[in-house]
Each structure stands twice: as structure tokens, then as C-alpha cells.
Amino acid sequence: MRARRREIPWFPGVVLATLVFTAVFAAYLAPHSPTEGDITQKLIPPIWMEQGDSDHPLGTDRFGRDVLSRIIYGSRISLIVSLIAIGVAGTVGTLLGLIAGYRGGVTDAVLMRLTDVGLSLPTILIAVVLVAVSEPSFRNVILVIALLLWPRFARQVRGETLAIKEQDFVALAVVAGRSSAWIISRHIFPNVVPTLLVISTLQVGYVILLEGTLSFLGVGVPPPSPAWGLMIADGRGFLATAWWISFLPGLAMVLTVLAVNLMGDWLRDHLDPKLRQLGRAAVLEAPAAASVGPTVDEAPVRGAPAGGGGG
Amino acid sequence: MKLEAVGLRKYFPVASGFSLRGARGWVKAVDGVSVEVAEGETLGIVGESGSGKTTLAKLFLLLERPTAGSLLFDGKAVADFGRDDFVRYRRAVQAVFQDPYSSLNPRMRVGQIVAEPLPRDSGMSRPMVAQRVAEVLHLVGLPRESPALYPHEFSGGQRQRIAIARALVTYPKFIILDEPVSALDVSIRAQILNLLKHLQEKLGLAYVIISHDLAAARYLATRLAVMYAGKLVETGECDAVYAEPLHPYTEALLSAALPLHPSARRQRIVLAGEVPNPVSPPSGCRFHPRCPRVLPQCSSQEPEWCEVRPGRFTACHLY
Amino acid sequence: MRESAPLLVVEDLKTHFFTRRGVTKAVDGVSFTLHAGETLALVGESGSGKSVTCLSLVRLVPEPAGRIVGGRVLLEGEDLLQKSSAEMRRVRGKKIAMVLQDPLTSLNPALTIGTQVSEVVRLHQGLRGTPLRERVLEALRRLRIPAADTRLRNYSHQFSGGMRQRVSSAIALSCAPRLLIADEPTTALDVTIQAQYLELLKEVQASAGVAVILVTHDFGIVAAIADRVAVMYAGRIVEMGSTLQVFDNPSHPYTRALLRCLPDVGLKREQLVEIGGQPPDLARLPQGCPFAPRCPERQPICDETYPPTVPVASGHVASCWAVPGAKARA
């Protein structure tokens, strides 16, 4: 028998807690400045290798900047970019998804075609072009990512809205004489929140990768900021001699994305409203359907998008 | 006060493939129905799936706009309603639906759910709202602490009580009951049916009970309307219809209902065939392909709606 | 008929569900026998264990949460619970067939009806070619599916609800099973279509001599077609007897209450007799009789010990302390 565990899984929990902790307390944790380096101290290998230096546990890059400090500050960039981009895209996407789903008809048709267009844009290319025509800046990276992200929210929220709209409590709210604004905010939105939480989490991984890619291509966060993607790009020329400059931030990125995706999967299994609403009745009254498969209550929905690799 | 449907029709377009414009046909869900409910009485609307009874309920609740015909409230057509009339209508006409799981928002507390129909501009203060909510919850027999709880903390029967409390909160005159006990356990049905009857006597409510369960309809209804394929086939005093059905469909429907004792196993009129496709219903009388007493003119001529006996209306060529 | 060996003997069947909230005793010691050609109705409310009992008979309890933890299920003398899953697959479909509540989900929407019926016949009877086709048509015609030979090419969505249920039943009966388990077969059907289906079921059963276990919550259906009734409450059979015995002399207070609380089409009643309270929570059953909290005839002993099963008349038993002789047996 497989018990459904309520507690948060340890691996993503530990990784994400570490990430948030380092991002918040970067200034206290980092042993050196992330941007200032001592050129005489360049290309020192990590501490466990020969010629390692306890002053720079993860070594230094070609300008003598401390890799550990840069990774720590880099987590702050990844986190801020993800939070703001997802916040903006989530708000816009959710709003449009709610309206499209609830209104239906022409509104829905127009908004959804717009979403389809948004979803069929070649992501990286558009990002490169957009950032290239404007100045590469922190703000622009966030805007570009948000622009590419909102249709994902809009589509998912619209689908969910369509399903919730069919519930009797929505019809009864109309009978009660309530306005559309009330129905959307009190009946539909709260029931979309769990899904929203799941997709937001799953997008964090995507945003970190995208930001990494953009920074790597030189159209992301401008140097000398310690963005992980930039660090990987920086170390490109030294892969044979000083692999740690690229590899360690890459590892940080992979671990973070993996952790976020695992967390998203876990959230999906535990928050999915369709699974939860069935509640107590499902265990005993579903067996008729169960002869073709496991009970709804016991089978977590699998099939989350797999987390990508490094930048 | 009176709620009256006059020649009410509701057609739904059947979309034709990919094109947005131009329907391929129409589902005639409700096709010319005239019924009325007066204060304090219970109209039972019975029929099988596809008879249009649920669409009729939605028309009464202004959840659908009629294609033709009109709905009169207190003699005034809904089509001519002003804002105040709508508010008054919403307060006077409430609903209880079949599925007590789908009718309660899982993320709202019972107190909020029950208070929802109270208009915000009614000038009621928070304590007054809470007071009214407590009153109706008491009326339906729920514990005092219910308002602070969420729906999932209640069983199916209790949830249906919450749904009834919400319908009562605005002091309505009419409650549309759409299959109010069909989703409930057998042992709970009696509780809810008794509660509905008790509330009606106490509060002078009028019910429209929509049901495929002839026994439940009979228990509550004073007048009965039988629907088939979007049309009324018979109306009359409930006891009279059950004792002596006029229309062959009513007769078959009553005979198909299972009696509660094995010794009452009797010769049933088992209808051949299926409920007709509402996109292209049969010509003439819609029941004629299944009718055991079909006459030659039934397939070509639509029977007229007429009063066969005092208070007994039917549409059938036999009369 | 009664003298011959019973077709099915179920002894002390126990199926439990192991969930986060604890052990749910969905079926907790169910015993009954069934003879060939007989119809036994399992009646109960949701959570009474009637569906899980049926799933246990064919070993389709949803695992891993649910497990059969005890008892014996003897079909023609062989214990089904001891069989390997490969052997069980041969029993299902060939000896025991099932009809479920929703015919839409029990038919595969991507295959034609003909393919689905022939698959079963081929699998269990090894027929091919013309004899297979003949057999399939015969199966469909027996359930009076009009124009069977042309409808073989149709998909399930092209059938109405009533016709779909007939197709599922045709599939179920195509291999001449000894036992048919029908789980709420008419709940999704309209009143007039339900009447059609029940008539047909009775007729086919009589001609094929198949035994039927009919799961239902509707006493009307029981009154209409069952030979014997077993009333279930909280995972146990509380009363069992011939249909007439149970309707005329209901001996368990729960049966009495259920029969009295229903509105009847034939009568106009002023007030229905209610059963108070709520159905029990199977994960937290009381120590004694689970019906005691709702029972109008409750005694002190009811809260302490589950009552023994006492014969009321020949072939009629009830499990209740109020039945005369119950205390003498304890």
C-alpha cells in the first residue's frame, strides 16, 4: 500500500530552502564581492583540488572573482527574475483566462487566438530580437520573459474556468442575483488558485532556464552581474583548463530547476482540485469505475513536463 | 403572486462543424410550454431525459433566455423588467439543484454560501445577515456552529439542507426544485422530502418540483405536468392524474414506475423504442412512434391542447 | 432446484481499504449462497459495501488500497480467491460476467460494437470467421438490438443509453456465463427504458439459466425482479431472505425503516417515516451494531456487541438483537 505523504519531499525542499536563504542573505553569506576580483588571484581551482585555496572554496574565474560568491548572488538574480516575471505573466494571464473562460463567445475566441499566437512564437528568437532592439537590462529581461509566459497561464486558467463555470454553485450565484465580477472573484478564482500555484511553480524552472539562456547569449542580464547564465558564458573559453567556472553555476541551475519541477509535481498531486473535491465519497463509491484502473483518489496524476538540463 | 409561462420555447443551435455562423439545426428543448404556479401550491413537472424539464427550470430561473414566448411574474413580462423588477424576481424565485456537491462552492464557508442571495444593497448590517443565516440554518435543522464550517465537513444530506437554507434566506415565494433528492441516499431522501413539505406548510412557499422520480413528485406535488420531447402532454390535479392518466404516455410512464411490493408486480406497459431525437422530432404527435394506442392521424396532425375534463388538459387525438 | 449444490458460496468475505484515514472495512464478513438461475439483489446505500462485494467476487478490488483480507468465494466448488491472476482472467468473462452502471465507460469508444463483442467471444470460445460472426449476431439479437448486422459497424456513441446497456449486456452474456453481476444496471436509464431493460433481463435470464447478482439501492427494482434479497449496511448483510419474506416481514429495523421511508407511486402519503442521522463513517465504526445510533429499537447491548445472525423463518435471517432468539444465541 502506498500512503499519500503530506509532508514536503526532502530533496526539493532542501534545495529550494537553500536557494531562498542564500538569495535573501547573500550579503552575509558571500565571502567576497561578486563583481570585484583580484586579478592576481585568477583561475584558482576549487578547494578539493591541488592548488586549491581555502579563501576561495569554489575557486575563482578569469578576473579573480570568487565563484562561490557569484553563485550565491546569482541565486538572488534567478529568484527575483522568476518571481517578478511569473507575477506579471501570472496576473495578466489569469485575468485574461478568467475573462475568456467566463464570457465565452467572441471575447473568448479573440483572446484565445491571441494566446495561440503567443504560444507559437519561437521563444528564444523573439527574446533575442526583443532584447537586442532595446538595451539589455534587468527590467527588459523580466518583461521579455513575462511576455512569453502569459499565454501559458491564460490557456490553463481558461480551461479551468470553463470547467468551474459548469458547476451548479455558479448557476445558483446567478439565481442569487450576483454580478459577473462577484462570481469570477468569489466562485471561480478561488477554485483556480490551486492550479495556478502548480503552474507557477512549474514555470519557475522554465524562467530560470530562459533567463540563463538569454544571459548566456549576451542579451540577458548585463555583465558584470553574477547571473548564472553569464557565468557559464564567461567560462566557455576555459572549459579544458578551468572547468569550474562554467560547471558549478550550471550545476546550481540544474539542481534548482530539478527541485522546482519536483516540487511542482508534488504540488500538483496534492492540490489538484479535481482530486480533492471527490473527497471521501471517491474511496468507496468509485469502485465501479475502478475495475478499469486504480481509484481516482489513490492515483496521482503524472505527466508533468520534465525539467530541462543545463543552460 | 403567480409565476406563469406562456408558450415558452427554447431552441439551442446545433453547431455545424467548423463554421461559426449558421446552425445545422435546432434542438427544440422546450417547444411551446404554458404552465402556471400560484402561491402556496406545488407544480410537479415529470418527464424523462430529453423531455426539456431541466431547460424549463433554467428558463424559470432566468438562466436561459427564451427563444419565444414569455414568462410572467405577477402579471408582468420578464422581457419588460426594469432593474428593480429583476432584484425583486431574484429575491422571490430561488432554486435547489440535484447535486449537493456541485451546488456548494468548496472554498466558501457555509455562512457565506447561505448569505449569498441577500442583496448587498438591502441595508442589512453584518449582524443582521448573520442572524438571518442562523435562522434559516435552524429552520433546516443544521447545528449552530455550521456557518463557520466548509461544505466538505458535511454529508450529502446535510449539504442539501445547506442548499435549501440558501434558497430560503431571501424570504422567497417560489422555489424551483430540480431533482432535489435524486442524488441522495435512500435513507436521506425521506428526511429531505419531509423537510421540504414542512417548510412549505410553515412558510407558504410555492414549489416547482422537476423530477423523473414519479414517487417523489407525487409526494410533494399538488398539480402535475407531464412533458415529452419538449412539449406538455398532460396537466391536472396530481391525484387525478395518478389515478386516471389521460395521455397514453402518462399511462406508460406511471406503469413503468416500479411499485414497492413484489405482490404488486403487474402487467406493465413496456414502451418500445427510444426518446426521440430533439433535433428532428417525429411529425404530428411526438409520441406516435412509441404509442400503443396510435391512430391514423397521429403521424400527420399535431394534437391540440384542450381541456378534456374540468381541470384536466391533454394533447391527444384520443379525446 | 434448491437441493442441487449452490453455484456460488461466499463465506465470511472481508475486503478492507487501507487509506490515510485508517482502515475502512468496506466489506466485513459477508456470506451468502446463490443457485443457478436465481436472482439475488444486494440492496444498500452508498458505502454499504454492495459494490465492493461484487468487485471482490471477481477480484477486481482497486489495489493497492483495497485488499481482500479473508473469506472464501466458491464458484462451482472452486475457491476463486486461491486462483492465480491468469486463471482469474479466464473466469472473468467466461464464467462470471459484469454489467456496470454507466455503459458509456464500459464500452471502448474507439472500437466498433462488432469488434468489442467478437473480441470477447473469440477470447473465450476460440471461434473465428463465419461461426464467430454468427455467434456475435446471436448475442446482439438476444438482447433485441434492432438491425444487429448493420449496427455491428457502429461505435458506442451512436447508441442511446438504453441500447448501450443492452450492448454491454450482450457482451456480458455472449459467452454463456454462469453468473452475471449487474451493478446498478438501470440507474443511468430513464423510467420507461429501465422497464424495457428489466423485462429483457428477466427474459434472457430465464432462457439462459444464468444466476444474477443485482446490486441496487432501489427497492422498486428488487420488488420487480429479485428472487432473494440481501440488505447491506456498513459492510455487512443485516437481513437476507426471499423477496416476499423480506417485504412482508422485514425483521431488521433498518430494512423496516428503509421500506417505510420511501414514497410510493401508488399511494399519497402525508408524512414519510424518516431514518434519523447520517450513514456511518466506515473508518470509524462503533464497537457494536453500526446501525445502533440511528435505530429506533436500540438497546444497551447494541452498543457493545455486534448481534448474531438469527433465523427468522426458513431461508430468512436477520442480524439484530431485537429479533427473538438473538440473545439466546449470543
Image (cartoon, grey):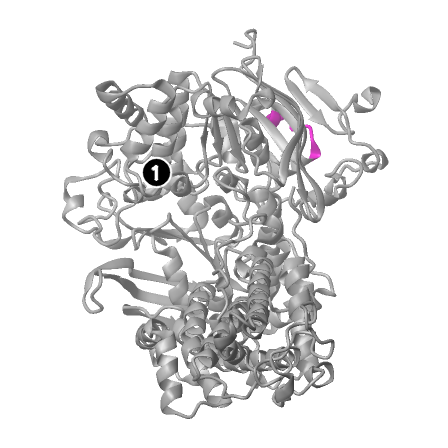
Q: Which residue is mark 1?
A: C164
Observer-nearest residue: C112 or C299? C112
Residue B256 in percent (x, y) is at: 40, 37
x, y percentage for residue B189?
A: 58, 48
Quadrant (top left/top right/bottom left/bottom right) for the C terminus of chain C: top right
Instruction: Locate residue A100: give its quadrant.
Output: bottom left
Q: Position of residue B313 (x, y in %)?
A: 32, 53
The image quadrant of residue C116 is: top left
Above-or-below relation of B28 to A256 = above
Image location of residue C292, percent across then percent down: 76, 39
Q: Is C323 situated left or right of B60 in this image?
A: right
Q: Is residue A37 visible?
A: no
Is C252 colored magenta in this rendering?
A: yes
Q: Is residue C251 magenta?
A: yes
Q: Nearer the viewer, residue B209 or C2?
A: C2
The kind of residue on which mark 1 rests is Arg
Q: How many marks?
A: 1
In front here: B236 or B93? B93
**Left or right for B17, reference B121:** left
Magenta residues?
Answer: C246-253
Label 1 residue SS: helix
Of all chains, the one bearing label 1 is: C
Q: Is residue B237 visible?
A: yes
* Relative height, residue B272 to residue A304 (above, below): above
